[in-house]
Amino acid sequence: MAETALLDIVIVAIDAIATVAFAASGLLEAARKRLDPVGVCIVAGVAAFGGGTLRDILLDQRPLYWVEYSNWLWVLLIACALAMAWMRTQHVEFTRKTMQWPDALGLGLFCATGTQIAYTQGMPAIVCVLMGVITATFGGVLRDIICNEVPTAFKDHRPYVLCAFAGGWTLIAAHELAVAPRFGVPIAAGVAVALRLLSLALDLRLPGWAIRRD
Amino acid sequence: MAETALLDIVIVAIDAIATVAFAASGLLEAARKRLDPVGVCIVAGVAAFGGGTLRDILLDQRPLYWVEYSNWLWVLLIACALAMAWMRTQHVEFTRKTMQWPDALGLGLFCATGTQIAYTQGMPAIVCVLMGVITATFGGVLRDIICNEVPTAFKDHRPYVLCAFAGGWTLIAAHELAVAPRFGVPIAAGVAVALRLLSLALDLRLPGWAIRRD
Amino acid sequence: MAETALLDIVIVAIDAIATVAFAASGLLEAARKRLDPVGVCIVAGVAAFGGGTLRDILLDQRPLYWVEYSNWLWVLLIACALAMAWMRTQHVEFTRKTMQWPDALGLGLFCATGTQIAYTQGMPAIVCVLMGVITATFGGVLRDIICNEVPTAFKDHRPYVLCAFAGGWTLIAAHELAVAPRFGVPIAAGVAVALRLLSLALDLRLPGWAIRRD
């Protein structure tokens, strides 16, 4: 039970950082698309909570994690308000590049906790990894859909979903090797973040397509 | 128990009016985007039932309200068919302005009933209000996403989500003041509708953004 | 019980064919939109499993069918990889027309099994048919939304949703006439597929609209 309690703390802490990271990515994307302040808050919220919410719905897990930790909703609202006030005075120019760092962090952290939560429910390995990938990427996918763009994760030919996929399998491997989850989860998160940052640094690209449009 | 039964009637009645109002908004938007008759019915249905369905899924409440009152599906289908037949003979020109009135009505009514339903489940106040906002706005958000537009509610700089937010908190305040829900729900709905109509009449705008695109 | 077991086999077999058909349609659409290989796999997966997943969520049925038969996820992944490798060497030109056949097949098969699953849960007839329609069409709708297009099913004025609707009612009629579901389900699927292919062959169109844009 002490083990479980410790693991819960690790998961909540990691999820908190990932939530902030994705909220920042949503805020930047919404600002780039010139949404109004309310739209910015909502897109930030969807980017932050969308992936985890979809995972909880698919796994039929209630209460949703942002219902259980509902104070986070206040934190998100206040953080968005402050960020908008600050950005307004600063005339900062945010580019896609600015978003890459928080995004990579959120990606790795969420894929590890999402995989772990499905694992705890006794799901098959492929489903666990898929839940990790969904947790990590669907916040961003929903963010892009709301902003009326084809999700970046599906079209920019950079390894993104693949990094989450690798992170998920790292956690499954750790479980197979009987590594305690309180170590396995951070390791898996680290692998995914490292892979993402490495692929950005090396400018790796997925192979292209040779299909003409009709 | 008589109190509960009475409240149920109030909620069903209010939901019915809001459903019709949002179905009309969906029908008009789909017609503007020149969808085919089947697409018009579906977008009208999504606009009418989408917000409440998402709320029920998030709260894990079954049967969904349109499964419980499934005759409403027939009403919607027949109403859409009649509306399309009528619009075809009339060559009416529908503008965004035409949609504002039914939209404001649906917004206020759904935010009150959505907040109340979450309140009955013992959710924290911020979650109740959020469920009210989701019930009130996500039908329209899904409508806009299907019609391939950035949701109007997030980008037109008019108070819309904010009105639902205020209506939700009005209901929470009414509960705190021990006002009976059968009064509190209509009051909260009225506040939200009034705020929305007032902000349209006064042409209120949310503050803008000073961020350049990259 | 032998009857139920036999019906289960019929449903699983039909669902398998429909899943492959829709995965192919998703793969082709994603390739046409020039998504990267990962995006192609995901859009193929969403097209294949999206409708059934939404049905299971709305009916609150767990485990989701692709969790229960999770080996299918491997089949999908490997099939997508092979298809992409093959398409790359062949420089095939895929048009909307290529997609019509697998799409028609998936449409008919999923509408029959979706209606049957809701029927087994004792839902009202209109809800059963709607669940069949959702199973059959929302994979494609989600595919189009992710690819940032107005769903084809809602705007191309061809009978598509209507064919699924007719197939669903065929199954309800079969139940009323006490036809065994192991016959009724394939018959309903056949009716929907036949209607779709017939309407394509005859180039049938839904009536248009006479509304000007504002």
Image (spheres, coloured by chain):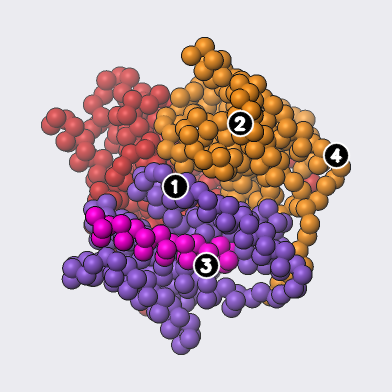
Chain colours: A red, B purple, C orange
Q: In the rendered structure, are the residues bearing label 3 and label 2 in contact, judged by CB atoms less than 8 Å apart?
A: no
Q: Identify the element where label 1 is drawn.
A: helix
The CA span between labels 4 and 2 is: 31 Å
Between label 2 and label 1, give the one nearer the viewer. Answer: 2
Between label 4 and label 2, give the one nearer the viewer. Answer: 2
Which amino acid type corresponds to the residue marked 3 in the rendered image? Answer: Ala
Residue A118's disc is none
Question: Which quarter of the rendered picture does the C terminus of chain C lie within?
Answer: bottom right
Q: Main secondary structure of the magenta part?
A: helix
Location of residue A130 in the rendering, given as x and y in whole percent from the top left corner: 45, 33
Q: Which residue in the protein does label 1 denote? A: B68
2 and 1 marks on the same chain = no
Outermost residue, left direction? Answer: A2
Between label 1 and label 3, give the one nearer the viewer. Answer: 1
Q: Nearer the viewer, residue C26 or C89?
A: C26
Residue B32 falls in image quadrant: bottom right
Position of residue C168 relative to residue B142, above or below, is above
Residue at horizontal 53%, vertical 59%? Answer: B47
Which chain does the residue under circle 4 lie in?
C
Between label 4 and label 1, give the one nearer the viewer. Answer: 1
Local crowd at mark 1 within 10 Å, few (<14), some, or many (≥20)? few
Q: Which residue in the protein does label 3 denote? A: B21
Q: Which residue in the protein does label 2 denote? A: C176
